Every structure is written in C-alpha cells, then in structure tokens.
C-alpha cells in the first residue's frame, strides 16, 4: 500500500506535456496556469517545422509521433495537443499508440461553440478546415446549427513574425473574416491556438455581438476532469514551466516574452524528421 501511495504521488507530480508548432500553444499554457496552477508543464514549440497548416496528414502524424515519444522520455503524465491541426489529423491515431492520456482541442471547442450560438464561423489553418473536423464535431453536438469555415494560411506566419501591429495583418484579417460576417455568424471559433493572439486586431472590426470561443479554455477544463478521474491531479506547488523548441531558442524566447511577460529560458530538441517548410519542394 505504501508503495502504491508513493507511486501515485510520483505520477501526480509528473509534468503535463503541451505542444504546438510555435507560440500558439501559449494560450493553452495561460489557461493551465489559471485553472490548474499546481501542475508542472513541459512545453514544446515545433518551430523548425512550422507552420503545420499546409502540411500533409502523413507529415503531421509523424511530427506528433516524434513529439509525444520525446515527451514520454521526459516522464509526462498527460499530453495536451495545443494545436488544432494536430488534433484534427492525428489525435485518434496517437491515442491508440501511447500509454498516457492525450487530449485535443476539437471536441472541447466544438461543444463550447454549439452551446454558444446557432450560426458558427470557424477560422483555422487550411489543414484543419480540409479535415472538416470542427464542422463534424459541432453537428454531432447540435445538428441544427449552421457552420461556415475559412482557412487562414497567413495568420500563423504573421504571429510568429511578431507582426500584430502591421497594417497588413489587419487587412488580411478583414479579408479572411469577410465571408463569415456576410453569413451573419453569431459565434466565432478560434480554430488555431495562435489566433487568440490576434484578439486586438479582431476588436478593431468584429461586432461585439459575435461570441468568441477559445477552445483552449474548454481543453483545460477537460484536462482537469481527466486528471481528477485518473487520480493524477497535483496537490503540490508545480515546478516552473520548462520550454523547448525544435528551431531557434532565442527567437522563440523573445517572441514568447510578449505574452509571458518575461523571456523564458528555452532548450532545444532535434527530431530526425525536422525538415523545415522552406526545404520542402
């Protein structure tokens, strides 16, 4: 019994692994810090291979396998996909392959949106839109709602390049969201974890009547329930978040400073299949 108690305590104090292609997953990290402040977090930004949004499903699955295998080596007790594209294209497969709970964004976000409105717009990466994952998940919750989706390939690069104040970003945002405004949506899903970083841009032209759904909040709520159910929730003060990237640590650190309030120390990890987008012919 004493051994079982020690084992349970050891597992509960293990970190939660959180990953995204870049800084987008910091929106999930922010919610984790707010809702589950005692948890230790291991954060990975796969910056050498971003953006994920125009990768093939096969590439995405391999990237996710690489990341989760590495996180398992670091002793995580749970993995949270802070990336909608990965959640849409790889979640079910890797859930079958790895012996830890793995949570994605699509279904928590879809449930929240279906409760919020009847005319739902989804902005996401082209890969997430092509998967139709949000559309299907929303209709599973409520078949009476209407859903419009728009792929936004330029958003992630603009955010990763720290161009939120660039007038081009506002123009791009208006162009992408125009069809959704024309459809008179009442709810907007941020179908990529990078997109909440664009909130100051959206506030300049989106009607306040349109409800915004950030799936990160619903994902962390789901994680809290899962941890409670599996008796893995930490009751101790968590360790400081450890950050790693597959690309340039300094670049990520300086970009993350904008949302964290400080420039974190960032380690680097290499993956065998780490081919950058510029190298893909």
Image (spheres, helix red, strand yellow):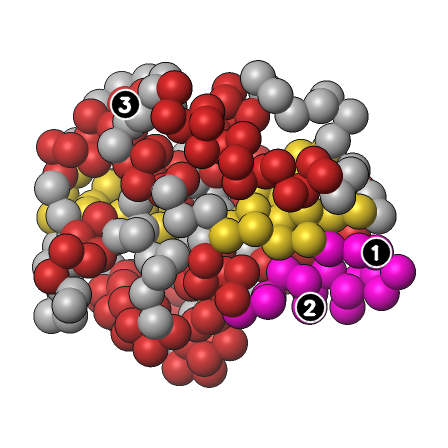
- Residue depicted at x 20% and y 30%: 253
Image position, residue 265 (x, y; %): 17, 32
Badge number at residue 136: 2
- Residue depicted at x 59% and y 59%: 106
Badge number at residue 145: 1
Q: Secondary structure at mark 3?
A: helix
With respect to residue 86, does 36 lie above or below?
A: above
Q: State the residue in front, 255 or 268.
A: 255
Image position, residue 137 (x, y; %): 69, 65
Residue 55 shows in the view: yes
With respect to residue 60, does 244 lie above or below?
A: above
**Dots 3 and 1: beta carbons under 8 Å?**
no
In the picture as drawn, the residue positioned furthest to the right comes out as 144
Crowd band around label 2 with a 10 angstrom C-alpha radius: few (<14), some (14–19), many (20+) = some
For the residues marked 3 and 1, what is the alpha-carbon distance in whole angstroms? 39 Å
Image position, residue 71 (x, y; %): 28, 61
């Amino acid at each position: 019994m004493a051994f079982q108690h020690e084992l349970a305590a050891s597992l509960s104090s293990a970190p939660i692994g959180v990953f995204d292609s870049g800084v987008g997953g910091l929106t999930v990290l922010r919610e984790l810090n707010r809702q589950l402040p005692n948890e230790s977090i291991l954060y990975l930004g796969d910056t050498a291979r971003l953006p994920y949004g125009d990768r093939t499903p096969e590439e995405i699955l391999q990237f996710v396998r690489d990341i989760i295998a590495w996180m398992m080596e670091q002793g995580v007790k749970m993995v949270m996909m802070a990336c909608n594209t990965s959640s849409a294209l790889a979640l079910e497969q890797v859930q079958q392959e790895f012996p830890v709970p793995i949570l994605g964004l699509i279904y928590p976000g879809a449930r929240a949106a279906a409760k919020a409105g009847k005319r739902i717009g989804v902005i996401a990466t082209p890969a997430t839109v092509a998967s139709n994952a949000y559309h299907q998940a929303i209709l599973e919750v409520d078949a009476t709602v209407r859903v419009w989706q728009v792929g936004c390939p330029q958003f992630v690069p603009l955010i990763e390049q720290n161009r939120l104040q660039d007038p081009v970003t506002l123009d791009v945002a208006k162009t992408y969201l125009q069809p959704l405004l024309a459809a008179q949506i009442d709810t907007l899903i941020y179908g990529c974890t990078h997109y909440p970083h664009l909130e100051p841009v959206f506030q300049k032209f989106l009607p306040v009547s349109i409800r915004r759904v950030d799936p990160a909040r619903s994902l962390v709520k789901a994680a809290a329930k899962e941890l409670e159910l599996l008796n893995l929730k930490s009751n101790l003060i968590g360790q400081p978040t450890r950050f790693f990237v597959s690309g340039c640590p300094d670049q990520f650190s300086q970009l993350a400073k904008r949302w964290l309030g400080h420039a974190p120390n960032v380690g680097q990890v290499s993956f065998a299949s780490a081919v950058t987008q510029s190298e893909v012919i």
